[in-house]
Image (tube, helix red, strand yellow):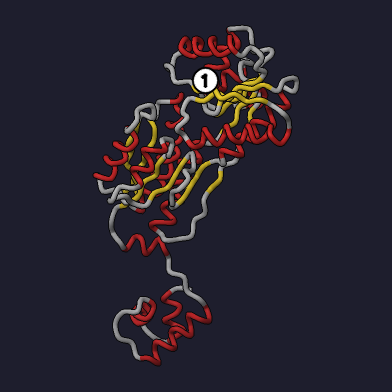
Amino acid sequence: MTITEIAQKAGVSIGTVDRVIHNRGRVAPETAERINAVIAEYGYQPNPIARHLKLNRNFVIGVLLPNLESESGYWRQCYEGICEAEKELSPFSVYVALEEFDRSVKGSCLAAGKKLLSQNVDMIVMAPVMDEDCHRLLAEPNMVPYAFVDSPLPQTNPQAIVAQNPFRGGLIAGRIMQMLAPQTNKYMIFMTYTAAYNSRERSRGFNAYFLENGDAISDEFVYNGGSVQKDFDRALDEYFAQKPNIGGVFVVNDAVHYVGEYLKSRGLKDRIALIGYDIIPENRQALVAGKIDCLLAQRPQQQGYSVIQTLYRKQILQQQAENTEIPVDVFFKEHAMALD
């Protein structure tokens, strides 16, 4: 029921109804009682969008992401979803301000976050992939309401989380690995960013699956080298020289195409199953070429879009908004070929 309809049923002016609803100005007690009786009988919900437009101001959502072209453009896909949401919300004076950081450089995320805060943003959406930096940023005295995209982060209180459950992703990887490589019980978990909560949780989920469903031995290999193929090859040559009996590799992020290229070039792919993350172009090509057996994907563009929309509803419209858990998509060669 609208304010106009309430006024008609109560036999009063729209202004009188407005004063009763918002408890401002003087209204005769019997008039207020009549208006409240109509509201109680028919109900009244204020229009949150109309209320927002009456504020007549811009809202700026700060966006804090790793360099958009890093990790084979994964973060570019996330930002594309953010821009799509911004385009839809721009008629309501909602805009985004982006700051990028280098997740390989300690303090980069914190510095970029402080730069956003200095721009007086109203809210921040961040990918909490650098735990220490993020916790320090959240402790800043001028910190604003915030939401997470891509990953949760323990011991924090975000307004919203739009991400996969990384532990569940690891469990799924373990189940698929057991089907792909039933002849072995020795696996490598390949990691590049041990400081990332979602990477650690994927590793923990992978191990948890085999604790319940077998006696597998999983060995974490942390790669801290360069981002060209020869650097990966050198590090993996040293690893496999010491541990030649590995039968499966789980890469907890999108670096899986480097490992796939290595296994193929060394003639190891036929006996080593390979699972990793994300349908970025390099990974998709490697999957189709048989260098990767399975990819798990997490819909970065949908995540970016959803987190902006959720934060808008919750912080600006003051509506209830639930966290969004992104499903774990599973791609084999046939799925990737069908994407053409």
Residues 74 and 261: in front is 261
The quarter of the picture where residue 277 lies is top right
Q: Position of residue 15 (x, y in %)?
A: 33, 79
Q: Position of residue 95 (x, y in %)?
A: 33, 46
- Residue 5 falls left or right of residue 325: left
Kindly identify the amino acid type of the residue bearing the numbered disc 1: Glu
**Residue at (48%, 83%) from the top-left corner?**
38
The residue at the far top in this view is 266
The residue identified by callout 1 is 282
Q: Position of residue 332 (x, y in %)?
A: 66, 25
Q: Position of residue 279 (x, y in %)?
A: 55, 27
User: Relative to residue 69, is residue 81 depicted above or below?
Assistant: below
**Residue at (46%, 50%) from the top-left corner?**
160
Q: Secondary structure at mark 1?
A: helix
Q: Is residue 340 visible?
A: no
The residue at the far right in this view is 183
User: Relative to residue 60, is residue 294 depicted above or below?
Assistant: above
Residues 97 and 141: in front is 141
Q: Quadrant of the C terminus?
A: top right
